[in-house]
Image: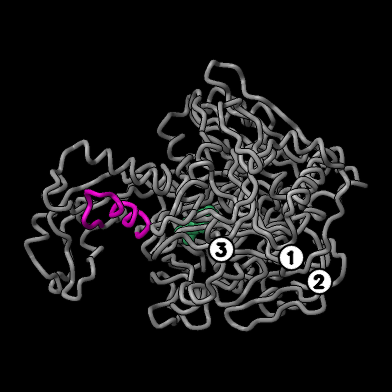
Amino acid sequence: MPKKKSAPPSASGTPSSHNITSLSHEARVFKPAPEFSTAAHVKSLAAYRKLYDESIQHPDKFWSRVAKEELVWFSPFKKVLQWKEPVAKWFIGGRLNLAYNCLDRWLNTPVANKAAIIWEGEPNADGRPGEERTLTYRQLHREVCRFANVLKRHGIEKGDRVLIYLPMVPEAAIAMLACARIGAVHSVVFGGFSAQSVADRVADSGARMIITADGGYRRGATVQLKRNVDDALALKDSDGNQIAASVKSVIVLRRCCNDIHMKEARDVWWHRELEYVTPDCPAAKLDSEAPLFILYTSGSTGKPKGIFHTTAGYLLGAKLTTRLVFDLKPDDVYWCTADVGWVTGHSYVVYGPLANGGTSLMYEGAPNWPEPDRFWRIVEKYGVSILYTAPTAIRAFMKWGDEWPGKHNLKSLRLLGSVGEPINPEAWMWYHNVIGGGRCPIVDTWWQTETGAIMITPLPGAIPTKPGSATLPFFGILPEVVDDKGVEVPRNTGGKLVIRKPWPSMLRGVWGDPVRFKQTYWSEVQHSYFTGDGCRQDQDGYFWIVGRIDDVLNVAGHRIGTAEVESALVSHPSVAEAAVVGRPDELKGQALVAFVILKSGVVAKHELREELRQHVGKEIGPVAKPDDIRFAEALPKTRSGKIMRRLLKQVASGLEIKGDTTTLEDYNVLAKLAQTSE
Ligand code: WT7
């Protein structure tokens, strides 16, 4: 059992590169339990330190060894890294296949008949229990090969982009792996995004195909995925041209038997297509740097960016972190609750677990439907041993009450993970005590869509944890907290979080926009990757992430750019101007507050608020609907016309307005704004 410590854990005389000479400074330190450490992949702080130091001082040697040990190569790489900032090429000359590394490599081993994916669907609205399916590695391999042949039959070739818009069903993983098998580039779009978002992503990526389903289930209702695709394909730009013109075919998975329209010569059924293909599909021998996927994510300006990742480096990052951070072992039942529409679903539902021969559980529905014990019921039913979820969910569970987890036997759990936003110490303690029974280590993992894999995290048998801190960097990762000039700040001082060295699973670019790539990530601080996060390091070198310092909000673990919501709002005929800021929210971390100036003549009626929320939902997706809309007469601006967001944030949070307001163009605006909150 990890002991609660108020005194320093026996300063075992292991000085470290992070100066962990003593861990006495923060309120609470949880040392790994000896029983856990003995069996863990990384067994001590000293072992972590030794490997970490090697990974930083001799990265070529470290990554070359690890890449050879972890991955199956068709041809060996000749060079570890070629770095011409900001362009990285890893494992040059190597050839491999990601689907081969996740599936074929297990076929002649005892893993072949083990569950690769255990899936449960949401219970139906009429009370029927959800469907259940288990796919062994052999079965999954077969399905992936068959579906890869379907893609080929539709003319999909290496390098072609395929958009995947599916619910949380095994077919999402099958479609991703099938693309990887033939070298097509997948772009998964979260099922909660709108038709407009689908069309924009098609246009940006030039996708030739969309893979979707007639529908998905969410809280007893069906999500109309195919209808959204139809709408997306019908959308026109301002010149009257079809936005998603590159799409030639749509493959539709039959699930809900929704009444949908199949368009001749464009739409085909997944199950029908399988009738035409064999299960033989050799894995393409792809270059290490072959593009693997594009995932769109919000930035501080403009439309979402297509973050793209390539094959070898990404796979290595996903595989290594899954095994070491979650201490994944052959008999674990591992459950990451993320949707495959986010990067967490890519790296830690699909690729990481399968590359390790693990068993990955997938659940389709919401945590509180039909009742708030849904997750705990699943943990008990399948004997889940590793659970990876988000602070926003943990805070909701806390609110719903201890009786819900209390109904179930959670003894199978041995490790808990958190991701997506800073976890407040209260939620950490609740997770530890109520869900983990005080015996499970918690790994608070910091990373991003751009980083591909976990970057700052405890290793559960090795690194003592402190509630609220993501602790120390993973192997090969060199984070620093710096000031505006890019100089490292002293301990316990806030600053910008940057990464000083390239790492294998880093993004390779913004799809089709190298200029934006350089500007966003490699220009803020010289010779460093800029994360967009604020951070401080404590005396022990532990990293405490504060949250975004750019105009990106983190609402219930979803990343939302304020600029995107603003442009959705001003696209409504009644709106003249809009500014969106975040305010702290107990459950969601941050809530979206929109200050809206209406066009003259439009009356600020209460119904208009709901109309605008719906409008944003339609433009972007339900996750981006503002929580609060405040009609204002004007926005506070500097003399140069820049909106003073700092002031708006204070108004939104109901705080007294502080700080320098001397550049405000019109002092009256502030007084009027404060009134909008009534
Ligand atoms: C942003 C990235 C890749 C994970 C899913 C979200 C925030 C993520 C943590 C954490 C504090 C965290 C950061 C980051 N974030 N994990 N453990 N502690 N903040 O991926 O949508 O690309 O968002 O999520 O602000 O920049 P994403």
Describe the element under mark 2 as helix, strand or loop.
loop
> Which image quadrant is residue 157 in?
bottom right
Q: Position of residue 547 (x, y in %)?
A: 41, 59
Q: Residue drawn 62% across and 43% down?
A: 336
Q: Is the residue marked by circle 1 packed among few (<14), some (14-19), or many (20+) residues within 10 Å?
A: many
Which image quarter holds the C terminus? top left
Q: Earlier in the sequence, mark 3 or mark 2?
A: 2
Check residue 549 in the rendering and tell me which mark sits there, or answer none.
Answer: none
Q: Which mark is residue 94?
A: 2
Residue type at mark 2: give it.
Gly
User: Mark 1: which amino acid?
Assistant: Ala
Image height check: is 153 above or below 492?
above
Q: Quadrant of residue 88?
A: bottom right
Q: Secondary structure at mark 1?
A: helix
In the image, taking residue 497 as reference, residue 580 lies left or right, namely: left
Q: Is mark 3 within 8 Å of ligand 1?
A: no
Disc number for residue 312: 1
